[in-house]
Amino acid sequence: MKHILLIATLVSSLATALLFVPSPSIQAQNRGAVRPAPRTLDGKPDFTGVYQGGSSKRGDWDFQVPSDQPGVPTAATQAAVTSQARRDPIPFQPWAREKAQEYVNLRSINDPTSRCLPGPSPRANSVALFPIQFVQTPKQIVILYEYFNVFRLIPLDQKSHPDDLEPSFLGHSIGHWEGNTLVVDIVGFNDKGWVLSGGIFHSDALHITERYTRVDYDTINYEATIEDKKVFTQPFKTSTTMMLREGERLREYICPENNEDVLRLEKLLDSPELFKRNPAAPKPQ
Amino acid sequence: MLNGQVTCLRLKPAETDEVYSIMRIRSVAFLLAACVLIFGARIEAHHSFGAEYDAEKPITLKGTLTKIEWTNPHCHLYLNVKETNGKITNWKFEGYPPNVLARTGFKKDVTLKVGDDLTVFAWLARNGTALAHAREITLADGRKLYFGPPAGTGEGTPIVP
């Protein structure tokens, strides 16, 4: 009887041990376990690091989700994109909705990025193809974008924007802390960009309020409220997560170097029958 | 040098999804085996895929690499492809910029060399020339890498509710 009990105990112990030996997948998850967001010496959340927008994966660079290239070919990729960059319905004014629809009918051929022109940060922050670096000091945060190799300076000690702002693609930013959230106010835009992909254009009245919260070591929750009284009927929001990518580095991206697309797109515009979509065609699912 | 051959693979739209699935499965296996990062993340390059290329016209071409351009906003591969009638055509393939290729596993002067035999899965340009948008390339040793983003239709986010 003792032997039976001993064997049963051994079997039970072995089974228990096996149950608690982490599988490779669980070990992988543990490596990405949630750690608290770091803080600077003055107690503020520390955003320093290189991130990948438009992703919710912890750890290494995320290449697993195909295509935001406007229009998505499969239901699976559509769902993935939706989960990563959420946006309210676009409250276009009637004339603007008509114009935006025409951009879509032309399959975004007029996207300013085709001419290597950058868009405002709600768009850039949700692009997963290129990393974004935060450089933080007590008085200023600098955001470096590999996408078009542009940068934003966000002073933390200015209460208002300068009164001599020139029209610009990325606008003028000022930031302040609300608890653990970095709040950034952006004005001073030109009317040449798309604030989001897919024909979501804007005017020089664009005003963006961004909220960056490093909710844990790996994750910045990003939300932008987009207002433009010349184009939209009311403010709307878009959001994404920006994931820390330790070991990743920003590289050069000098878009105009050999931008053959401009010439090809201009030729295509002379022959819209080659590419123009049927507005009545079913939308991609 | 000029020993490639054409393997045209016309797929119906419904079959295109299958291609994506197959590519993903192959890529995951390759990732596990070789620990090399490939794949496409949430893609937004610098222009609309759908305006220039036709997602309903996938093509697979085999040929010999004649030139590589490491340029922005797109790198290009040039492939001498022997068509069924024996004619050699120099095809041009557009792909990711150099910074992105570095993350998808390409190393300049190491991964690709002029003279290599390659198989390229791509989508044809709408302008009807020997131009295509490359997605997956298969190296002579069988390794597969993503040279460009997946196809989009260019339909964009629906504007009209």
Image (cartoon, coloured by chain):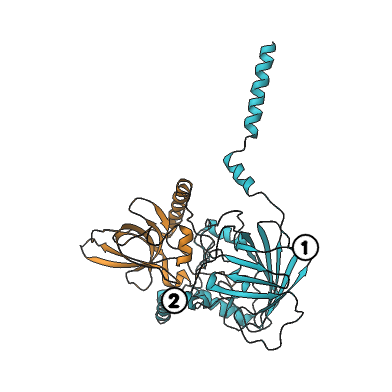
- State the image coordinates of residue A226 (x, y, percent, origin top left): 68, 74
- State the image coordinates of residue B7 (x, y, percent, origin top left): 30, 57
The chain containing the residue under callout 2 comes to: A
Q: Which of marks 1 and 2 is nearer the N terminus?
A: 1
B42 or B152, which is in the foreground? Answer: B42
Q: Which residue lies furthest to the front in this view?
A: A41
Left/right of residue B119 with respect to residue A24 in the rendered view: left
Q: Residue at the spot x=44%, y=51% of the render?
A: B22
Residue A220 higher or lower than B21, as above or below:
below
- State the image coordinates of residue B115 (x, y, percent, origin top left): 28, 60
Left/right of residue A270 with respect to residue A244 in the rendered view: left
The residue pinned by badge 1 equals: A43
- State the image coordinates of residue B123 (x, y, percent, origin top left): 39, 64
Marks 1 & 2, CB-CB < 8 Å contact: no
A101 or B27, which is in the foreground? Answer: B27
Q: Residue A257 carries which label?
A: 2
**Chain coloured orange in the rendered structure:** B
The chain containing the residue under callout 1 comes to: A
